[in-house]
Image (cartoon, rainbow, N blue to C red):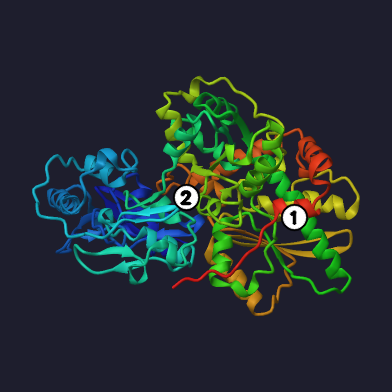
Amino acid sequence: MAENMINVTIDGIEVEVPQGSTILDAAEAVGVYIPTLCHMNMEKIGMVNKPASCRICVVEVEKRRNLAPACATPVTPGMVVHTNTKKVLEARRTVMELLLSDHPKDCLTCEKSGDCELQAMAETLGIRKINITGKSISEVPVDESVAIVRDMTKCIMCRRCETACNQVQSVGALSAVNRGFPAYVGTSFGAPLDETVCTFCGQCVQVCPVGALQAKDNTWKVIEAINDPTKTVVVNTAPSVRVALGEEFGYEPGTSVTGQMAAALRKIGFDYVYDTDFAADMTIMEEAAELVDRLTKYLKGEEVALPLMTSCCPAWVRFIETQYPEFLALPSSARSPQAMFGAIAKAYLAPKLGIDRKDLVVVSVMPCIAKKYEASRPELGTDGDQDTNISITTRELASLIKQMNIDLFDMEEEDFDDPLGESTGAGVIFGKTGGVMEAALRTAYEWITGETLDNVEFADVRDAAYGIKVAHLNIAGTDLNIAISSGLANARAIMEEIKAGNPNNYHAIEIMACPGGCVNGGGQPYHHGDEEVIFARRQGLLDEDTGKTYRKSHENPSIIKIYNEFLEKPNSHLAHQLLHTTYAPKSGY
């Protein structure tokens, strides 16, 4: 409404903006650039960070004595703002020099070099010399977990990670410590991440503007394995990797580079190149069978653990183990696709290749940092040999390709190897919120009804980017209440409902730790606050699903073959031994 609009002037440009807008909002409305560092506004996925702590965005407001932070100052009627006066430019440069004076100078070897927002901002502001000198007093020991490395000497107190951990994910592993130069974002009592309730989801890493938070780099382990003549090295790539990897090589976000990626992996030196989508189809076989079994018992009036909750997200599994251990009977016992692939590779593929399981090195390429943690879980291995030996992120794969001097643009498309490389559209959509539930329903519907499902797209469970979506479905006369939850803060809301007695009578729930699903995983190329990148990746998966010959997991010929000749049937004794797992309460501070 017109009465809720305010007229302001930004650098001589008049603009009308809604009441409650900030100066930064008004500037963006007319295309005036105001540099920001701590600010991040991704409302669609719940990531909004506006602490006004960096002061890079200061501007001059007429009739105001001091400079105003544009990201946190509401506009007022008739406000006149100048974004590029000498006073403003001097203030920004001084702030930047102060930040740089207390920042390590190891840019050449920093993981974020080239992707560092502090580095880019120094370039934007024309910083060529630091006039403020002194010994850094931000001396905090480096914390290196199996998944995340924290180097708080690089922390600039933007507090994005704190917002991601506490607001978006509600995990509560990180908070501000100290004031002034010694300030940083740390854990309670300075505990290592391994000893906290951290889920290793990596959302803190994804939004950190500098190298203070990084994924544990396993690329050299891959190079060593490939060059070990006593080892056979196989690789499998997760669904959402194929629609994000191209960004590291100049492709538009969401562009599928599946064929080029398979070719590049062979050129790197992997002996066999497989698709995690195959294992996603296998996950559906086991999880859908478990869902049908629980529902059948429920309808007979038997005591059964409902709602069934998906279990393919390791960050979510750690979340429920640390924060809601009393409900560990609810998640499906089916392993994640990464864990299933590793188990099948060691138990089925290794004998086919005529080698010992310990001489088969299984490498997974994941969008997820928590997969590094999952790969290390002792229950996902045999006699000290982990089923998945090395897990790397999409970013690490891009680094490997570049190190090997491979140009993704020049690669002719190639297919995955058989028998673990054939997949369906159901496996593809695992990488986005709502995809696991939709894939499970495509199979469960046909198993329950005995009828062919012509329209495989369950629009009612397709994702909200961030939040909780509830769908009510009727399958063969049975009313099902389904919930889709994206982001761990929403998972907490779901768990609190269940704690209160499941008043909505949910029968099945999908939980994805990362807002939007794996397309927004902590190991994906950095989105730098552009949420449209995430939606483009999501669309890329939907497009690939539509183009698949098979779109239901139980129709995958390779899946049918492996059950016929090895596993017998879903939830068989052998399938349970290899493809299912157990959960246990995990302590945190």
Q: Say which mark, if any, is on residue 524.
A: none
Q: Is residue 481 left or right of residue 194?
A: right
Q: Quadrant of residue 125?
A: top left
Nearest to the eye among marks 1 and 2: give it: 1
Query: Element type at marker 2?
Result: loop
Quarter holding the C terminus is bottom left
Residue kind at label 2, given as amino acid type: Gly
The first of marks 1 and 2 along the sequence is: 2
Closest to the observer, 247 or 133:
133
Q: Residues within 10 Å of mark 2 (few under 14, many from 20)?
A: many
Residue in front for this viewpoint, 360 or 552: 360
Asked which quadrant contains residue 19, the reply is: bottom left
Q: Residue at x 22, y 68 (%)?
A: 179
Q: Position of residue 242 (x, y in %)?
A: 56, 36
The answer to whether any part of residue 458 appears in the image is no
Estimate the x, y position of residue 373 in percent, counting from the top left: 51, 54
Tag 1: amino acid: His
Q: Report the number of discs.
A: 2
Tell me, yes or no, if residue 420 can be seen here.
yes
Is 336 placed left or right of 261 in the picture?
A: right
The residue lying at 82 percent from left, 64 percent from top is: 295
Residue for badge 1 = 576
**In the visual, does 286 lie left or right of 92?**
right
Q: Secondary structure at mark 1?
A: helix
Q: Where is residue 317, by image quadrant?
A: bottom right
- In the image, taking residue 225 as reference, residue 541 lies left or right, namely right
Q: State the image coordinates of residue 403 (x, y, percent, origin top left).
A: 40, 29
- Which residue is the site of mark 2? 522
